[in-house]
Amino acid sequence: MAKTAAEYQRAYRERKAELAKQAGDPTDKISKLPFSDYVTTDGNWPVVEEVLDCVGVTPPAFDADDDKQWREEWGEPYRASIGRAERMVGAFLDAASGLADAIARYKRKEIDRVIADLEASDMNVPAAKKKALAEIVRLNRIRDQLDKQVRWSLSQWKTTGEN
């Protein structure tokens, strides 16, 4: 069966993305100073270390221009310390997203529990009913906040050479 134009286009985009992934970052070819040497002189690095340390995460060390965790099966070129740093950004973002999801689920569950308790409470007394309904409305607003997504602005850290 012949491919549709959309299928040809999808296959082309997939091939192009795979080639870009294998080619690595175009800034690798122009960089003279290894990232491991640069990061120790960057004025922001002590802030990164302090922030991670404050939450009990051991800050990474960039003592040498290497990447001992790199694996060939990832299909990406070995890029030494800059490749490791870029993967760390992705890992931190994934971890932050997963933790934020867990926190939101926990809070929703607790809100739902309190709402169920309020709904099961004695609402025969008008003042108690009014207070309980007001609390349910307040908790529903909080739960609605937890259903929203937030965005953080980050500097672009990966480049592909494409516009």
Image: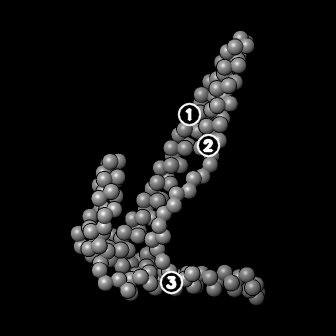
Q: Secondary structure at mark 3?
A: loop
**Residue that sits furthest to the top in the current view:** 125
Q: Quadrant of residue 120?
A: top right
Image point 26% across, 74% down: which residue? 37
* Amino acid, disc 1: Glu
Asked whether residue 102 appears in the rendered view, the answer is yes
Q: Horizontal and vertical percent for residue 47?
A: 33, 57
Q: Which mark is residue 161?
A: 3
In the picture, which quadrant includes the N terminus?
A: bottom right
Report the residue at 29% width, 78% height from top. Answer: 34
Front of the two marks 2 and 1: 2
Q: Which mark is residue 110?
A: 1
Q: Please state if 151 lies on the left or on the right of 81 as rendered.
A: right
Residue 145, labelled with which disc?
2
Residue type of the residue flagged with mark 3: Gly
Classify mark 1: helix, strand or loop.
helix
Q: Quadrant of the C terminus?
A: bottom right
Position of 17 relative to 119 (above/below): below
Give the distance between the C-alpha atoms of the residues marked 1 and 3, in whole angstroms: 47 Å
Q: Which mark identifies residue 65?
A: none
The residue positioned 69% from the left and 13% from the top of the image is 127
Query: 44 or 114: which is nearer to us?
Result: 44
Q: CA distance from mark 2 to mark 1?
A: 14 Å
Please report the residue visible at 35 percent of the width from the left and 52 percent of the height from the top: 51
Tag 2: residue type? Gln
Residue 132, x across and y down, in percent:
66, 21
The answer to the question of whether label 1 and label 3 lie on touching residues, with beta carbons closer than 8 A, is: no
Relative to 67, say whether 9 is above or below: below
Nearest to N terminus: mark 2 or mark 1: 1
Query: x%, y% of residue 98?
Result: 49, 53
